[in-house]
Image: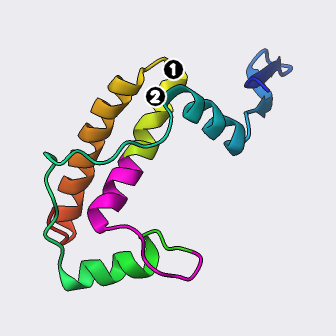
Amino acid sequence: MKNKVKIISDKNGDSLLDTLQFRSYEETIGKIKKKVGDRPKMPRYLPKGIWTEQSIRVLEERYLLKDVNGKIIETPDGMCWRVAWDIASAESVWGKSKNQVKKITEAFYKLLSSVLKVFGMEV
């Protein structure tokens, strides 16, 4: 399904949004994966984090990926790369190539890293 917007006018002639429909999350992710494929490995030249005990504990409890048995299967740096890729890969919907998405991912990774420093999670 394509995104659909229906606009109507009220009695004063003002435009009103009547309906707004979007692709499902699954359809959108499928479209992105078709264009850019799976997430590439994090480049070795990107900065690695120096994580405090507290930040690691919070990430382990809430954000790091776990397998079906609850075992943690990614590092904090890997989590930052995953989140950065997921944000940047949406740009493929508007025509960015996989190489362009990778460059955007690196920029988001660096931004995310700098934000985490503010919260005591040095990257």
Q: In the picture provided, is 120 more to the left or to the right than 32?
A: left
Instruction: Look at label 2 and name its amino acid.
Output: Glu
Residue 91, which numbered label? 2
The quadrant holding residue 102 is top left
**Label 1–label 2 contact, CB within 8 A:** yes
SS for tag 2? helix
**Residue in the image at 79% along x and 20% along y:** 7
On the image, the x and y values in percent for residue 116 come to 23, 62
* 42 lies left or right of 30: left
Q: Which residue is mark 1?
A: 94
Drawn side of residue 90 relative to residue 117, left or right: right
Give the residue type at disc 1. Trp
Q: Position of residue 63 (x, y in %)?
A: 43, 70
Q: Distance between the Cα atoms at labels 1 and 2?
A: 5 Å
Going 73% across and 25% down the picture, which residue do you hit? 3
Q: Is residue 5 magenta?
A: no
* Magenta-highlighted residues: 68-84
**Residue 13 or 119: which is nearer the viewer?**
119
